[in-house]
Every structure is written in C-alpha cells, then in structure tokens.
Image (cartoon, grey):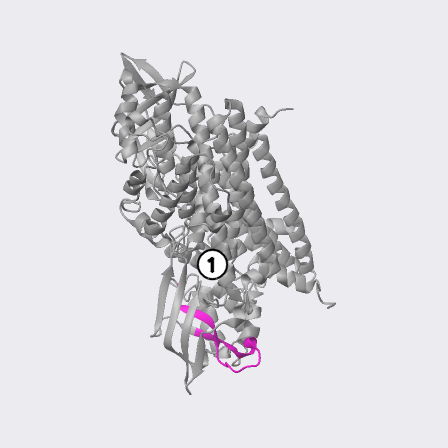
C-alpha cells in the first residue's frame, strides 16, 4: 500500500524503534502487559531527542512537518513494532487545540512541555451522568474576578493518577439556551488544593482510570482556553484530531502475527475451522488496509478525511476484538488462569491473554462509542433528513 | 444488588421430575439472596480464602453436596437435573466455590470407584468436609487431543508422569480423580491431594483452579479406580452440561442487569432502553437466553437417559448454542454498560468473565462442532 519512498521511510522508523526502545519494553507492549511510567517516559525522551515526539505538529511548534501520509506510516509502524503509546491527551488532543485556540502565553508555556513529556495531561470530559451525552455535563465553574472556582466530579479520567495537568470541560453559563453553549475549557494544575483523585479498579485488577472530585478548586483566569462558554466548539476539534491514526492497522497486523504464532505452536492453524476464522480475520484486515489506502490518497491530495475515518474506527476496533477473541480461543483452557500465582513458567505471557481479551472490550466504548460513531455516519449520510 | 432471583423463573413451567427440586430451588434462592449479594461476593472473593464465608457449609446443610450420591455414603437420591438447577442459580449469583467440580468428581468416584474409595471420600463430600476435583485436561484442553499423562506399573503400584492443566476446583481439592494412559487405555486414579504437586491459583472469573505436576507421583495399587474411559466420558459430558446450566444462570443475570441499567440510565434526556437500536440488541440478547435454557436442559436429560453417542451429540449441541448465547450476552452486557461495564465494583464485567471462560472450558466451539460432525446422521 506504500510507495517505494514511503517503504524506505517505514524502514527507517522501524530501525529507530528497534535501536531505541528496549526489547523488554516492546515485548511487554506486545504481550498486553502494562509498562511502567518510567518506561513510557524513557521512550518519550528518545523520540523527543530525535525530534519525533509529535510528528503531526507543525514544524514551528517542534513537529516534523511531515505529510499526513508520513505521519500515518510513522504511527502504524510504531504500533506494529510494539513501541509504547505516549498517550494522546497532550500530544494529539490538547496540543493541536492550543495551537488553534490557545493564548500566546498558553502556547509558549504548555506546548514545549507537552513535547518534552515534562507535563503529562489527562482529559476531564466524561462525568457520571454525561458519557455519550457529553453536553449534559454538570461540573461547573464560577468566576470570582481573578479565578474560576470549580466544583463537581469527573469520571473515567484515564491516567489522571499519572498526570500533572488536566484539560477539562466545565459549565460556566448555566442559563445558556442550549447546554452546549454554556461550557468552557479550563487548564487545571492537578496539584491545586481541592482536587481528589480516586482510582476506579477494573476487572483486570488494573488502575488506568479514575474519578476526580473538585471542591472549590481555584483555577487562574489565564488558564481558560479561548473565550468563555466556547469550550464545546473547542472540544469537537479535540475529538476530531486523531482521525488518521484510528485505523489501528498496525496494531491489528501485530495481533494477527501473534495469533498465528500462538495458534501454529498448538497445531491449530491446521484445524480447518480455526484456520478459516484466522483467514477471515486476515481478509478483513486486508479490506481495512485497502480502505485506509483510499483515505491516504485523499490525504495525499490534501483533502480532509471524511466519514470513512469513522467507519475505519468502527471496523478497526471490531477487528481488534475479533483478534482478541481468537487469541483467547487459541489459548483454550490456558486462557483462564490469572495473576502472579498462575504464571506458567513455560508460557509466562499466557496469563495476560484473557486479560487482554477483556481489555479489548473497551475499544468499542471509548473515544466515542461505536454507537455514537454510527450516529455520526448516519447524520453525514443524511439519513432522516427528509423528514 | 442481588442477581440471584430471576423474573423469568416464575413464568417457567414447574420443574418436572422430583418435587424435591422445587423445594431445593426455593431454599437455594433464599440462601443466595441472604449470603450471596454482589457485595457479599466481592467481600468473599477478596478474602484470603477467596470464597464467601460459610457458603460451602450452607450448601452442605441444604443437601446440595449429597445430591445423587449413594445413600450408604451419606448421599441423597436425586437426578442430575437437581444438580443442574443448583448450578444455574449459582451461575446467576456467580458463586466462586467449586460446587460443579466437586459434584462431577464425586459422581465419578461413585460410578467408577472401588467400594473402599467410595467409602473413603464420598461421606466427606456429602457432608461438606471433602472437596473433590477432576484432573483430566492437559495443555489447551482441546477435546480431541489425546491425553499424555501416563501410568506405568511399579511394584504393586503405579508411577505417573505428565501434567494436568487448569483443573477446576483444584486449588482447594482434598481428592483428585486423575486420568492417565496405560497400554493405550484410559485409567483413573483417586489420589489424596496431599500426594500431588500442584500450583494453585485463581482464574480471571475468580474461581479457583490448579495445575498438577504428576512426574514422579507413585501411587499404591488401590489408588486405581475399577472404572475407566467410559465413566470418564460420561463425567466429562456431565461436567459440560452442568457448565451450560451455570452459563444459562449467568446469561439470565446479565440480561436482567442490562435491562435494569438501560431502564434507569438517561442520556440525551431519555432512558437508554428507549433507543430503538439498543432495544433490538436487547431483544437479541433475550432470544439468546431463550435459546440457551432449553437446549441446556436437553443436554442434562441426555446425560441421564441417552446412549453415549446421543449423549455426546446433545451435549455438544448445547455447548455450541449456549456458548454462542454466552458470547453475545457477555459482550453486549459490557458494551451496553459503557465504562461501568469494565469496573470491578460492578457485576457486568464479572458476568463477562464468567461467560467468557465458560466458552474456554470443556472444549470450545470448534471442538464441539467437530465432535458433533463426527456423530451427525446423514
């Protein structure tokens, strides 16, 4: 799917990953085991030193100035090689938003710190009563002349326990005619008094997400992004910023390779029924790749991605779940044991595989559930517009 | 939050067979609603023993551990369907104690064990002081894979070799029934757990299991059980059918939980269950439940009445269909709960784990399709 030049670039990226990211770390990523924040930071520093921490950023802010296609190849190659994810909140979501809507002071202060990894951001959007219906959020902030005073609760705040900063949506005008019109975006230092971060324990025993409580948290006026009450508009840009990298082709290719390796060791690739499902998954991946090529060609021509990006998110995430299911099947009864006691010295990676099957259930929920993606597509297709 | 009483059960026809079953069902429902709320389960699984305190003793007191075992060893005349009824309720409450593994192994000792072996182990099982487990599966647990564990004669007794993996209930078992090959024939041994090297652990669904290392295990002559491969085949089918009953209970609980959640959770100013796209999915989940329950019951009946080939076909059919329902309902249960569906403090993820591991146990979909295909009439 790549030109010769693009292939050469992919090879360069691959070589960089293999030289600069320890094999032990890549094995953890591929084995679906959690890496430490130190390991993530070390990889961030390596990428930063090479000037590759934020390839999609404009060169003036420390990006690479690459084309959308190069950026895509870079992301997919990293994923295929098992390089740790640096996290999207600062680099992919807030960074581009600040470039467009932030004040000069905000840009000068925060962008370099995002790039270097000095600041690690989390996103304060979802709330107990505001998930798919994000605009119904209730956390609110009142302006007291110098500060915004925040009260309320955020939920599903991924990585809040490792982050030092949060960009949050808060209600600042409760009397606005539409709920979307009374929301602002604030940049909140998590060391501010009045913030309580509590873990949400997932079934896999891991803490990746949190509840965050705000009790009269004072946020300086200069930490408001753009204008008051316009946060909803900015958040739409935030959520739309990841569009080219959501196909997960590289990740799915990596998972397929792992599946074949594990299944082959057990002779399962010769079992007709199982083999047929692996083939079907590979064909699905081939179809997604072909679809991604179309998206790349649009990008090469300088066109913005259309709803095929949403479609790729749906199908890419579903394939991720199919592959996770097949991996669990390949492991058979061996998928059941869990935890340190259960580690089979002959197959130390096995204990993480059903966990990863479970973890993969989240990919059709977060980042706009697949139900919401389908709503967006339906709207774009004009369904029901004739009413 | 209590998952153990089902709305649908009241609409089901009265249990066929023993009247006892109706009474037992009531008693067990009462027990589970008293000691096995989701919160009580959470406290139990997090405790050092990884079980709900007093649950095993309460099962014994109700007579559940005596069901179908010989009366001269403290047992109680009953049908496999009575055990299945208990398994279904336990599936709905996601109990973590090894009820099914113990009953399967105990029934195997009753069917294939020597009188001395029965007298040694069964009274303890029936009274709740002995737990039993079957250690048969190896490696990935493929149904058709031949067993590799071997038994060779040594003096008067036997020397075993090989490994058994993920023996359900093996973490706390007092006695194992272990399968092995000798001269190409399957033989069974009843072995006190203290004699066996085991690695005990919990599974992703919080039930316990163990891997056994049989290398160097030397057994006296009287460890050999008189019954062999046929009894084992029956026991494995029973274990599969009982697991289907457990899964049906979990499917019912998952559907109930989803309806409760989507009925109360509001987004865009409406309850989630008012969105047609979600309604259709919950209808499919309801269909999956209604498909699973009767075929699981048929499998139990076939275990009691049918010839081996018919029994195998009925059990494989149930494993495939209940498995399909389990996968659909388990996955949708998480999806329709959104983020809540992944947290440890809420039952949805636990139901997903229970149903997901049901699919992985007792042979998976492909295994049973192949076995059925081999037995299918043309």
Residue A320 covered by magenta stretch: no
Q: Where is residue A131 in the image (x, y as percent from the top left)?
A: 50, 65
In this view, the residue farthest toward the right is A386
Element type at mark 1: helix
Q: Quadrant of the C terminus of chain B?
A: top right
The answer to whether A79 appears left or right of B73 in the picture is: right
User: Mark 1 = which residue?
Assistant: B339
Q: What stretch is highlighted in magenta?
A: A163-187
If the image is split into quadrants, where does the N terminus of chain B sit? Answer: bottom left
Among the 4 quarters of the image, the one containing residue B49: top left
Q: Mark 1, chain letter?
A: B
Determine whether, in the image, residue B261 is placed left or right of residue B173.
Answer: right
Q: Position of residue B21 (x, y in %)?
A: 41, 38
Closer-to-camera residue (B92/B51): B92
Q: In the image, is residue A27 above or below residue B180?
A: below
* Count of numbered labels shown in the rendering: 1
């Amino acid at each position: 799917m790549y030109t010769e030049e693009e292939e050469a670039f992919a090879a360069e990226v691959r070589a960089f990953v293999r030289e600069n990211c320890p094999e032990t770390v890549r094995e953890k990523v591929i084995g679906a085991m959690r890496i430490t924040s130190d390991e993530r930071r070390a990889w961030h520093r390596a990428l930063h030193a090479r000037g590759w921490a934020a390839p999609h950023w404009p060169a003036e802010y420390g990006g690479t100035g690459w084309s959308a296609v190069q950026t895509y190849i870079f992301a997919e190659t990293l994923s295929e090689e098992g390089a740790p994810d640096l996290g999207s909140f600062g680099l992919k979501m807030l960074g581009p938003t600040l470039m467009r809507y932030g004040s000069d002071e905000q840009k000068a202060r925060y962008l370099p710190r995002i790039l270097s990894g000095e600041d690690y951001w989390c996103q304060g959007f979802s709330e107990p009563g505001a998930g798919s219906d994000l605009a119904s959020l209730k956390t609110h902030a009142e302006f007291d002349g110098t500060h915004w005073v925040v009260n309320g609760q955020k939920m599903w705040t991924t990585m809040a326990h490792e982050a030092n900063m949060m960009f949050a949506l808060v209600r600042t005008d409760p009397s606005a005619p539409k709920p979307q019109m009374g929301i602002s975006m604030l940049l909140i230092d998590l060391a501010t008094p009045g913030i309580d971060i509590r873990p949400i324990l997932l079934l896999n025993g891991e803490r990746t997400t949190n509840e965050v409580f705000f009790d009269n948290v004072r946020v300086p006026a200069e930490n408001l992004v753009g204008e008051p009450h316009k946060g909803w508009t900015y958040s739409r840009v935030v959520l739309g910023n990841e569009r080219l990298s959501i196909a997960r082709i590289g990740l799915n290719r990596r998972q397929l390779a792992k599946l074949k390796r594990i299944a082959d060791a057990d002779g399962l690739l010769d079992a007709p029924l199982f083999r047929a499902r692996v083939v079907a998954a590979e064909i699905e991946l081939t179809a997604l790749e072909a679809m991604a090529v179309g998206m790349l060609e649009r990008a090469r021509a300088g066109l913005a991605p259309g709803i095929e990006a949403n479609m790729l998110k749906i199908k890419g995430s579903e394939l991720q779940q199919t592959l996770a299911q097949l991996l669990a099947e390949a492991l058979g009864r061996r998928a059941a044991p869990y935890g340190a006691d259960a580690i089979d010295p002959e197959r130390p990676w096995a204990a993480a595989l059903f966990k990863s099957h479970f973890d993969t259930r989240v990919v059709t929920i977060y980042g706009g559930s697949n139900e919401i993606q389908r709503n967006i597509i339906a709207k774009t297709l004009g369904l029901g517009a004739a009413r | 939050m209590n998952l153990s009483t089902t709305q649908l059960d009241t609409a089901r026809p009265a249990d066929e067979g023993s009247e006892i079953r109706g009474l037992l069902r009531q008693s067990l429902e009462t027990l589970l609603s008293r000691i096995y709320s989701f919160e009580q389960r959470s406290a139990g699984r997090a405790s050092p023993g990884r079980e709900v305190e007093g649950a095993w003793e309460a099962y014994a007191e109700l007579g559940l551990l005596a069901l179908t075992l010989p009366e001269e060893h403290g047992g109680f005349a009953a049908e496999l369907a009575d055990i299945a009824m208990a398994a279904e309720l336990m599936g709905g409450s996601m109990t973590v104690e090894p009820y099914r593994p113990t009953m399967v192994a105990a029934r195997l000792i009753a069917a294939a064990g020597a009188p001395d072996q029965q007298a040694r182990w069964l009274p303890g099982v029936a009274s709740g002081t002995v737990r039993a487990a079957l250690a048969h599966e190896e490696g990935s647990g493929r149904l058709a894979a031949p067993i590799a564990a071997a038994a060779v004669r040594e003096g008067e007794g036997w020397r075993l070799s090989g490994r058994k993996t993920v023996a359900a209930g093996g973490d706390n078992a007092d006695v194992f029934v272990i399968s092995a090959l000798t001269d190409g024939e399957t033989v069974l041994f009843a072995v006190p757990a203290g004699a066996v090297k085991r690695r005990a652990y919990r599974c992703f669904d919080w039930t316990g299991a163990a891997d056994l290392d049989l290398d160097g295990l030397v057994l006296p002559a009287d460890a050999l059980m008189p019954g062999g491969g046929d009894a084992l085949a029956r026991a494995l089918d029973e274990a599969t059918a009982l697991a289907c009953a457990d899964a049906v209970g979990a499917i019912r609980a998952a559907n109930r939980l989803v309806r409760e959640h989507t009925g109360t959770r509001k987004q865009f100013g409406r309850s989630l269950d008012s969105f047609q796209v979600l309604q259709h999915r919950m209808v499919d989940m309801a269909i999956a439940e209604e498909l699973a329950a009767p075929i699981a019951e048929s499998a139990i009946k076939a275990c009691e009445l049918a010839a081996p080939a018919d029994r195998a076909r009925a059990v494989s059919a149930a494993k495939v269909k209940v498995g399909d329902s389990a996968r659909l309902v388990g996955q949708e249960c998480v999806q329709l709960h959104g983020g809540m569906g992944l947290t440890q403090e809420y039952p949805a993820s636990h139901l997903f784990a229970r149903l997901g591991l049901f699919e992985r146990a007792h042979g998976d979909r492909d295994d049973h399709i192949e076995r059925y295909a081999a037995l299918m009439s043309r």
